[in-house]
Image: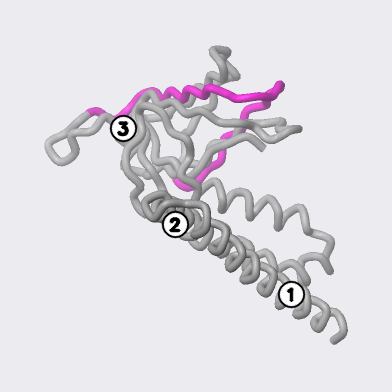
Amino acid sequence: MRQHLSSAVWIVGGSALNALGTLVGVRILTQFLTPGSYGVVTLALGMSTLAISIVSTPLTQAAMHFYPAIAATGSVRDLLNSLQRCFLRMAPWPLGAGWYGQEGGFRWMAPHATATLTPSPGAQQFELATFVSSDQLKQTGPITVSVTVNGTSIGKRQLAVEGQQTLTWPVTGGGQASVEIDVTPGIGPSSSDTRSLGLAVLGFGFR
């Protein structure tokens, strides 16, 4: 009971401080900015709030809901890994060439696609989560996925069964990473879909 009361106090206190900070911030902005500049800042803040409500808030609430039970079993790392996979699937990755629009919980990539990522300190592998349908395997046969980071190949993986799968490659080093993903064979354009397709990607990133 005392633990729940303490948590409630922290939550209420944090909300109060957030509201106070908002009021102070608005007062400062209205005093020093022109109406036009204030409108731009307000728009930017609104977009930031929308992004937080879509990505951060659901993950935070899920973590708060499941943490007590999971902590009691000593499986906190499993919770963190699950949240990370959810974030990878939700995040609008810094995509380069070769990507198509979001379709539900995945995004099609072309046979060659690029992205620019910044691995977290201590990242030890590159992860690519994908879904392969039985129709795709019937059409293409086994699929080879090759990944290049900053111009250096980190290896190939093969997809030979249908379903959701996660491929991993060991990596070293840090700093900004230019990632290239190649898929062979791809799916060529057809009368029903004029795109050249590689994989249906659920998420990817360094971890």
Q: Residue at x 37, y 34 (%)?
A: 109
What amino acid is labelled 2 in the image? Thr
Q: What residue is at 87 percent from the left and 84 percent from the top?
A: 2
Asked whether residue 144 is in view, the answer is no
Choose between 30 and 122: the one closer to the eye: 30
Q: Which mark is residue 197?
A: 3
- Give how far across and how far down residue 50 sits, in percent: 46, 59
Looking at the rendered structure, the kind of residue marked 1 is Gly
x and y percentages locating residue 131 in the rendered image: 44, 44
- Picture residue at 53% right of the left edge, 22% below the top: 178
In the shown orientation, is residue 183 left or right of residue 16? left
Q: Give yes or no for contact between labels 3 and 2 (Cβ–Cβ under 8 Å).
A: no
In the rendered image, the residue lying farthest to the right is 2
Q: Which one is closest to the eye, mark 2 or mark 1?
A: 2
Circle 2 packing at 10 Å, graded few (<14), some (14-19), many (20+), is some
Give the mark nearest the N terminus, 2 or 1. 1
Rendered view: 83 above or below 152: below
Q: Amino acid at mark 3?
A: Leu
* Residue 96 magenta: no
Which residue position is annotated with label 2? 42
- Considering every residue shown, the one lying at the far front of the view is 31
Colour logic: one colour
Look at 51% across and 28% down and name the residue there. Answer: 116
Q: Which residues are magenta?
A: 163-188
Residue topped by disc 1: 13
Q: Quadrant of residue 66?
A: bottom right
